[in-house]
Image: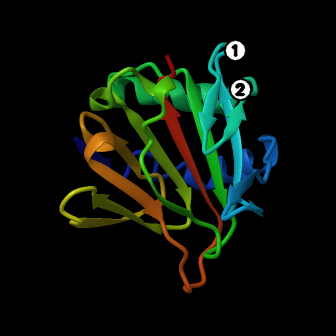
Amino acid sequence: MIALHEDFAQREHALWLELLRAELPWVQELYFRGGRVVPAPRLTSFHGDADCRYLYSGIAYEPSPWTELLLQLRARLRPATGHDFNSVLANLYRDGRDSVGFHADDEPELGPSRDNIVIASLSLGAARRFVLKHKRSGERRCYDLGHGALFVMSGRTQHDWIHALPKTQRAVGARINLTFRLIC
C-alpha cells in the first residue's frame, strides 16, 4: 500500500533542510560492486534507538543518537502514519548526480515478513523523481517528490515492488530524504 501526502511539511521544509544538513554526521559509504570498492552516490546518516542496528548492502549501521529535530519529526509522523518509528536513515542527495538504484527495503531487521514493512519517507528540498517498479510485471509508477512530501510504503510494497531515485541531468538543488523505519 502506498500513500502520498504532498503537503505534509510545505512551510517548514527549507528550514529543516538547512538544519539537518548542518547538524547530522553525514558520511559517504563505500560499497563493493563488480569486485571493486565504489563510493555511494549520496551521503547518509543513520539515527535511532540504541538497540536499532541495521545492515544494508553489506554496511552495518550503528545508530547515532536522535537529534532534537529528528525526534520532533518522528513525533509528527505518529498521527499521520499510525506508527512509532524507532530509527531513521537520512540520505543527502547533493545534486542531480546523486542517486540510489533500484532496491527493496526488505532486510530481516525490518520484520520477519516482507508483507508488513512500513517505511515513511519524508522529502525535504529539491523535487526529485521517485520510481517504483513492479518486480513481476515491470509496471512503473513515477512520483515527483519534494517540498515536504511524505510518501508511506507499507503492506506488500517491499515484497512486490522495487524503488529508486535515478540520476537526473536537470539542474537540481540539494534534497534530504528521511526514511523512518521500525527495526525489530
Looking at the rendered structure, the secondary structure element under dot 1 is loop
Amino acid at the residue labelled 2: Pro
Amino acid at the residue labelled 1: Ala
Residue sitting farthest toward the top: 51
**Mark found first going from the N terminus, 1 or 2:** 1
- Quadrant in the picture for the N terminus: top left
Rate crowding at label 1 as few (under 14), some (14 to 19) or many (20 or more) other CA atoms within 10 Å: few
Looking at the rendered structure, the secondary structure element under dot 2 is loop
CA gap, disc 1 to disc 2?
6 Å
Q: Position of residue 49 (x, y in %)?
A: 64, 17
Q: Are marks 1 and 2 in contact (CB under 8 Å)?
A: yes
Q: Of residues 133 and 23, which is closer to you in this image? A: 133
User: Is 121 rendered above or below residue 107?
Assistant: below
Residue shown at 27% from the left, 56% from the top: 135
Image disc number at residue 50: 1
Q: Of residues 83 and 155, which is closer to you in this image? A: 155
Q: Position of residue 86 (x, y in %)?
A: 54, 20
- Give the residue number, with chain letter if any, for mark 2: 63
Residue shown at 69% from the left, 66% from the top: 94
